[in-house]
Image (cartoon, rainbow, N blue to C red):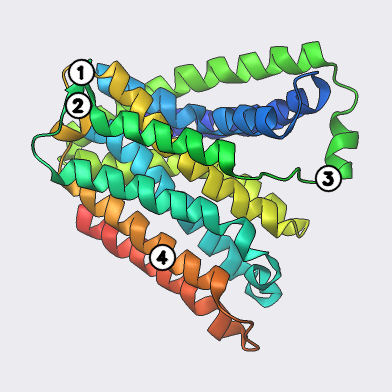
């Protein structure tokens, strides 16, 4: 029964999150508040709602490793998605068509925030303020500074998508967005609870359940978005959405800490989460290499870094298991 609940919850999270992204994008287009910053925050919040809901539920059932592992695991799974989709479309050599300087700032910020989390996991006696780790205040401050200083350009919307959704009014879009949010709330809660039960029943590491099984479930909407972007050759959107989502997930880790009122959440999280953080570091380093390298003529030479990312993910996942 636990396996069925977990699977159904994962399916509902994926379907609802895809709708969240669709209607969130439509709201940002039709509302008077539309604009680069508002649209980015709305879409980022929509696509990251499954991770946030699941992690907060994990906190309330006192499974910190699922809460932390879900956030860190979602980041590495997102990078896996980007590498896997790029490998499938390797003949297009999409990264050679992307302007690297537009995406490198997001990765540098990712290095800083992930490094901060790894250091907090490693350090035994972190300072706390209102039962929240001091590192979380620093993390949020860095994220806000990055968002304000980064010159985010408006992306050109796909005309076919706009035509498909043009019949919906702003009111209906908000209603459907709210309904999808409620489904994510319920399904995300069920996903965390059933994941906790699954870990107890099978004896699997909670960090593995959070960073691999649950993280993969909550990140599948990103797979849909990246695959769709590649199909219409919007490679900049594919790369930017993954890197932006990863930064937002790290910021949401601070919100998770606020709900965990027993102290700094990273102080009680398992050290195995550090391995996921280091994996994220390594995968980002390979992504930097992909963005900065020169053009190559051979398809398999181009695809090799993506293969490295894929292999790293499965090796570390096996180690966690």
Residue 297 vertical placement versus 86 (above, below): below
Marks 1 and 3: CB-CB under 8 Å? no
Whole-Å distance between the Cαs marked 1 and 4?
Answer: 33 Å
Q: Which quadrant is the N terminus positioned in?
A: top left
Whole-Å distance between the Cαs marked 1 and 3?
Answer: 45 Å
> In the image, is 263 to the left or to the right of 305?
left
In primary-sequence order, the first of circles 1 and 4 is 1
State the residue position of label 1: 131
Secondary structure category for the residue under label 3: loop
In primary-sequence order, the first of circles 3 and 4 is 3
Q: Residue at x 71, y 52 (%)?
A: 229
Secondary structure category for the residue under label 4: helix
Q: Which mark is residue 158?
A: 3
> In the image, is 253 to the left or to the right of 244?
left
279 or 209: which is nearer to us? 279
- Evaluate whether residue 19 shows in this view: no
The x and y percentages for residue 91 are 68, 77
In primary-sequence order, the first of circles 2 and 3 is 3
State the residue position of label 4: 285
Q: Label 4 crowding class (10 Å Cα cut-off): few <14, some 14-19, many 20+?
A: some
Residue 285 vertical placement versus 169 (above, below): below
- Evaluate whether residue 25 shows in this view: yes
Secondary structure category for the residue under label 2: loop
Q: Label 2 crowding class (10 Å Cα cut-off): few <14, some 14-19, many 20+?
A: many
């Amino acid at each position: 029964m636990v396996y069925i609940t977990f699977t159904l919850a994962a399916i509902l999270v994926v379907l609802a999150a895809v709708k969240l992204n669709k209607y969130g994008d439509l709201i940002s287009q039709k509302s008077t508040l539309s604009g680069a910053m508002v649209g980015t925050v709305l879409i980022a919040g929509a696509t990251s709602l499954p991770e946030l809901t699941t992690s907060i539920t994990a906190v309330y059932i006192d499974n910190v490793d699922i809460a932390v592992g879900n956030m860190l695991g979602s980041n590495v799974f997102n990078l896996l998605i980007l590498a896997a989709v790029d490998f499938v479309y390797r003949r297009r050599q999409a990264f050679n068509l992307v302007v690297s300087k537009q995406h490198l700032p997001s990765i540098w910020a990712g290095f800083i925030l992930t490094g901060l989390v790894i250091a907090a996991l490693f350090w035994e006696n972190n300072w706390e303020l209102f039962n929240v780790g001091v590192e979380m205040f620093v993390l949020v401050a860095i994220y806000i500074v990055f968002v304000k200083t980064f010159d985010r350009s408006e992306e050109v919307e796909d005309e076919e998508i706009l035509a498909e959704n043009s019949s919906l009014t702003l009111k209906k879009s908000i209603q459907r967005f709210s309904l999808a949010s409620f489904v994510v709330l319920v399904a995300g809660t069920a996903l965390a609870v059933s994941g906790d039960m699954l870990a107890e029943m099978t004896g699997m590491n909670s960090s593995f359940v959070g960073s691999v099984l649950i993280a993969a479930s909550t990140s599948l909407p990103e797979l849909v978005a990246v695959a769709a972007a590649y199909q219409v050759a919007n490679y900049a959107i594919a790369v930017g959405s993954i890197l932006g989502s990863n930064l937002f997930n790290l910021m949401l880790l601070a919100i998770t800490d606020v709900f965990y009122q027993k102290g700094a959440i990273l102080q009680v999280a398992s050290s195995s989460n550090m391995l996921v953080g280091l994996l994220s570091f390594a995968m980002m380093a390979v992504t930097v290499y992909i963005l900065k390298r020169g053009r190559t003529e051979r398809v398999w030479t181009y695809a090799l870094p993506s293969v490295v990312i894929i292999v790293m993910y499965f090796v570390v996942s096996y180690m966690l298991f």
